[in-house]
Image (cartoon, rainbow, N blue to C red):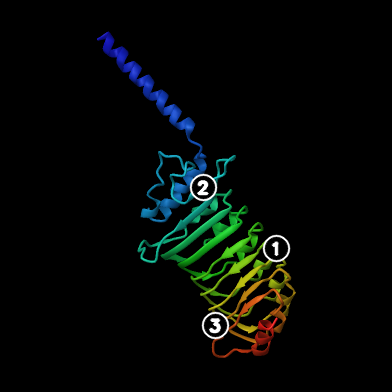
């Protein structure tokens, strides 16, 4: 009897030791793990997040699409890619905004991802890269994106976004790329975009944009690519044709009156 008790005590001690070592070896911050599991719940527990489980370490590369900072062990990177055959319906989880150390967020090729961009994303003040592309996300491009002062790259292409181009994006002076190709955006290009001095790419093709092209865009010395095709823009675009700039303006939708034929020929001849 005494021997049995001793053996049971030793087994219990071994279990406690192994459990404590397991917890000690985990690098994932508990608050970040809690938020990630809430994100999974808000996304209706999709198959592509099946690796996100409570008893594993979210920072050991076993969680699909999650990366942590080497020194901080905070979640800094979420990259999730679906496929066009994916039938899982969900919306962008509002809890994403609670990953306050997040630097990069990529959501790509989820045809059943719908609804608007949640305002909670405005809390991601460390965000540098934001990609929501090839989805069913709809509604306007929110003006609160202007709060993401560290943003370098914004890709909202191939969605179902509507409304106007928000002037607030001109407050993001670190931006090098804006890509909103293939949406349903209307109205004109804000003149204030001419203040984005670090902008390298401005992709606005395949929308319903109208009005005149702002002359201020011609002052952007770092601008290399401008995509304006398949819109309803009008006016003279000659100020965009610098020696180092590539401009696409073909197949402008009916109703536009762009004067570009001569400038295109001059550009090709440089």
In the visual, does 172 lie left or right of 34? right
The label shown at residue 37 is none
Depth-wise, is mark 3 or mark 1 nearer the camera? 3
- First along the sequence among labels 3 and 2: 2
The residues bearing labels 3 and 1 have C-alpha atoms spaced at a distance of 27 Å
**Residue displayed at 70% across by 63% down:** 173
Residue 163 horizontal/vertical position (percent): 55, 75
Q: Which residue is disc 1 drawn over?
A: 173
Q: Quadrant of the N terminus?
A: top left
Q: Which residue is disc 2 drawn over?
A: 67
Residue 121 horizontal/vertical position (percent): 56, 58
**Residue displayed at 64% across by 84% down:** 211
Q: Kindly state the secondary structure of the residue where label 2 is placed.
A: strand
The residues bearing labels 3 and 2 have C-alpha atoms spaced at a distance of 38 Å
Number of other residues with Cα within 10 Å of mark 1, as a class: few under 14, some 14 to 19, many 20 or more: some
Q: Kindly state the secondary structure of the residue where label 3 is placed.
A: loop
Residue at the left extreme, as displayed: 1
In the visual, does 62 lie left or right of 5? right
Q: Are marks 3 and 2 in contact (CB under 8 Å)?
A: no
Q: Kindly state the secondary structure of the residue where label 1 is placed.
A: loop
**Residue displayed at 47% across by 51% down:** 65
Res 20 quadrant in image: top left
The residue lying toward the viewer, choosing from 31 and 254, is 254
Residue 131 horizontal/vertical position (percent): 53, 62
The label shown at residue 230 is 3
Depth-wise, is mark 1 or mark 2 nearer the camera? 2
58, above or below 160, in the image: above
């Amino acid at each position: 009897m005494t021997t049995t008790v001793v053996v049971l005590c030793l087994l219990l001690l071994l279990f406690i030791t192994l459990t404590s070592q397991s917890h000690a070896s985990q690098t994932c911050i508990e608050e970040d793990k809690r938020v990630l599991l809430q994100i999974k719940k808000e996304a209706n527990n999709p198959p592509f997040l099946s690796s996100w489980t409570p008893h594993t370490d979210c920072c050991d590369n076993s969680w699909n699409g999650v990366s942590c900072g080497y020194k901080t062990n905070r979640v800094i990177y979420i990259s999730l890619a679906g496929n066009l055959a994916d039938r899982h319906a969900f919306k962008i989880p509002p809890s994403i905004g609670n990953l306050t150390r997040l630097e990069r967020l990529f959501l790509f090729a989820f045809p059943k991802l719908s609804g608007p961009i949640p305002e909670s994303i405005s809390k991601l003040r460390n965000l540098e890269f934001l990609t929501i592309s090839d989805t069913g996300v709809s509604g306007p491009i929110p003006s609160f994106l202007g709060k993401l002062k560290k943003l370098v790259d914004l890709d909202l292409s191939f969605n179902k976004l509507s409304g106007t181009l928000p002037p607030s994006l001109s407050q993001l002076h670190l931006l090098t790329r804006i890509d909103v190709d293939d949406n349903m955006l209307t109205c004109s290009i804000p003149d204030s975009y001419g203040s984005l001095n670090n902008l390298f790419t401005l992709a606005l093709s395949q929308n319903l944009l109208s009005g005149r092209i702002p002359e201020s865009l011609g002052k952007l010395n770092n601008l290399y690519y401008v995509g304006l095709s398949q819109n309803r823009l009008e006016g003279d675009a000659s100020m965009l044709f610098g020696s180092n700039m590539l401009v696409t303006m073909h197949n402008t939708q009916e109703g536009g009156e762009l004067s570009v034929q001569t400038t295109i020929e001059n550009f090709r001849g440089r």
